[in-house]
Amino acid sequence: MKKFSIVMCLALVLSLGTSVMAQDTPPGCPEGLWTLWSAELESACKGELAGTVVTMAGPFVDADEIKWNNTIAEFESWTGIDIQYTGSKEFEAAIRASVEANAAPDIVDFPQPGLLRDMVLAGKVIDINTFMNADWLKENYKQSWLDMATIAGSDGETIMAGVWGKNFGKSQVFYPKAAWEAAGYAIPTTWDELIALSDQIVADGAAPWCVGIESGAATGWTATDWMEEIMLRTTSLENYDNWSFPADAANRLPFDSPEVKHAAEVLGDLWFKEGYVYGGRESIAGTYFGDAPSPMFTDPPECYMHKQGNFITSFFPESVTTDGFDFFYLPPIDPAYGKPYLVSGDIYSMFNDRPEVRAVMDFFSRGESMKNWLGVGGALSPHNDAKLEWYTNEIERKVAQFISEADSVRFDGSDLMPGAVGAGSFWKGMTDWVSGTADLDTVLPEIDAAWPK
């Protein structure tokens, strides 16, 4: 690590003939790496914050915690700042307790923005707009990411509650590559083409869709993902936000609204149509989500398409290699709403305001903060300056490219909702409806009734 004394800094200034300009590369960090940085990141890269400590808490444990520590090690060596990360499997309870005791770590990694909003409402989270360069944030994030980081406090005023650090994509449709190509099927780019393809597969004697929503106590979550996909494709982002993450009760879009019911009906038309789902409607609720894609890989395939997050490949049969499948973007439905992408991910928020904490937060707003993790696999970067060649996993590289090409991104809706709904009545209601034990007019008000008053 290079340490720069005051004399050395003055020498650098004099050698340039002028004062150090805002776009000059800080000498402690790799040349050409930084643009539009905060004063604190510039100071850190000069070595002026060496020896300071930044504490951080989050959900990364085991292998992910090792990946994270390896990812931040380079920045620590450049700046001399020690980022001390503590991971917990009981993250939500642990962070609530520490914040309530006024003993919050400097930075917290939130995998669920709903919990972060609770902290914003309590006035505990620092607005990064107080020191981050707004032009940089707009340059390095798709506007949707900034929208999702903007949260209203108890006084109604909004703050930029953090920076997005990593994410996962959900809007992919997997298919068995060799059998698909042998059948002559084309990748659909519109919903009408998707339905026409589904009809063709039925005519050819197979089921177009592999679907399963069983997941033990979490049965139904895959159905909620599908509902979120269709909501994004059939109504506005404002409606999606007011449905999943409303700023106040007055603007909340209830489950029994026409917009939500329409999305469910579109899903029902796809899942309940005769011959469309392998095993029929009656099999969906009882099929384990991890087993659902397996019939794609029989000879011949018994179903051809499975929509799921990129993690699902770990559930494919062991005999299936990366050459055995491919995937495409789930097409838009109404052109008026463009090409949205459903994601999950982690947002890093700041609880204590010191120069070294500001510098680390600025670093986290940059693709370089994820470079090492992308190289070993297991995450995507939401940063515009992250390069596709950093990904060594072909699947993750392709998903990252899809997300970068999307018109908008939105977080998994059930993860944004209060737990009683998103991890409770929404899961149960979708399961009841899909299994045929209740109709939509019964289920949707029941889901909504669990929303805290």
Image (spheres, rainbow, N blue to C red):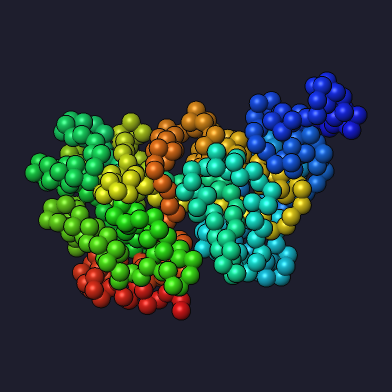
Furthest-left residue in this view: 203
Residue 303 in picture, x, y percent from top left: 20, 46
Q: Quadrant of the N terminus?
A: top right
Residue 344 in sight from this viewpoint:
yes
Give the residue at x 63% y 64%. 95
**Which quarter of the picture shows residue 110?**
bottom right
**Which quarter of the picture shows residue 76?**
top right
Give the residue at x 67% y 38%. 37
Vertical relation: 418 (above or below) 133: below
Vertical relation: 339 (above or below) 77: below
Tally the numbered discs. Answer: 0
Furthest-front residue in this view: 18
Viewer-nearest residue: 71 or 118: 118
Horizontal side of 18 relative to 338 (left or right) equals right
Give the residue at x 50% y 54%. 148
Give the residue at x 43% y 52%. 410
Viewer-nearest residue: 316 or 194: 194
Residue 78 in sight from this viewpoint:
no
**Which quarter of the picture shows residue 237?**
bottom left
Residue 393 in picture, x, y percent from top left: 46, 34
Furthest-right residue in this view: 7
Viewer-nearest residue: 235 or 287: 235
Residue 198 in picture, x, y percent from top left: 16, 45
